[in-house]
Amino acid sequence: MRFAMWSGPRNLSTVMMYAFGARNDFAVMDEPFYAPYLAESGITHPMIDEVLAAHETDPARVADSCRSGGNPHLYMKHMPHHMLPSFPMDWAGDCVNVHLIRHPARVIASYAAKREAPTLEDIGFVQQTQVYNQLGGIVIDSTDVRARPEVMLRALCAAIDLSFDPAMLQWASGPRAEDGIWAQHWYGAVHQSTGFSGAEGPLPDVPPALQSLLEAALPHYSGLHERRLSP
């Protein structure tokens, strides 16, 4: 099985990668198109020089690696906004495609704490709708996973005809060998974790300067939220 998890940033995506990586039957890939995206888009991100030096920047070569198998399964963490129009997408056609969503108020609050003045392009909601419309697949909401991790992981495994493994609920703290080099900037909280951190609280307040961003992202979130997997 080749499993493509599509998610915007600050959305439980690294935790989900760690959960599947805790299984003995999965190899994992961490945002393989991130370096090609940075190289071609010209956008400035934290640690851009290190990312470009450490990771493959040719999207065709990255696509080839995404066509490979796993151990016996391959879990790929992808961000929709990394898939620029010129990048190959044919490799995803026969993957199990799952779309991980999170309320944009939570995404914006978390992202703004790591990178100033996020844009709609940065948080990926428009692109996630586009990828869903192109590939279809299963939608899961990170709020549901945080509230009932075992229940939702069992439901997800059942939906893709995969046996549930209790190892998905716990892992050793610290970084993983599969982490992208950017982990030292973005993954601090995950590296301190040994499992899912429990239900989320009320939605955070979004500052006035980012209200228009929230309003632009909400329709995309709501459209996918209506299709989310229920246990």
Image (cartoon, helix red, strand yellow):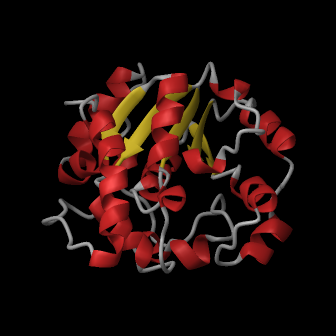
Residue drawn at x 19%, y 47% is 148
The quarter of the image holding the C terminus is top left
Residue drawn at x 24%, y 54% is 146
Q: Nearer the viewer, residue 93 or 165?
A: 93
Q: From the viewer's perspective, is residue 33 above or below residue 187?
A: above
Residue 155 placement (x, y as % from top left): 27, 30
- The total of numbered circles placed on residues is 0
Question: In the rendered image, is residue 193 in sight?
Answer: no
Residue drawn at x 73%, y 73% is 48
Residue 20 placement (x, y as % from top left): 48, 45
The quarter of the displayed image where residue 208 is located: bottom left
Residue 140 placement (x, y as % from top left): 32, 38
Judge left or right: residue 27 versus residue 123.
right
Judge left or right: residue 221 versus residue 43.
left
Q: Nearer the viewer, residue 196 or 229?
A: 229
Q: From the viewer's perspective, is residue 103 above or below residue 151?
A: below
The quarter of the image holding the N terminus is top right
Q: From the viewer's perspective, is residue 97 above or below residue 212?
A: above
Q: Nearer the viewer, residue 222 or 186?
A: 222
Question: In the rendered image, is residue 16 in sight?
Answer: yes
Residue 86 placement (x, y as % from top left): 78, 39
Judge left or right: residue 168 versus residue 105.
right
Residue drawn at x 65%, y 73% is 45
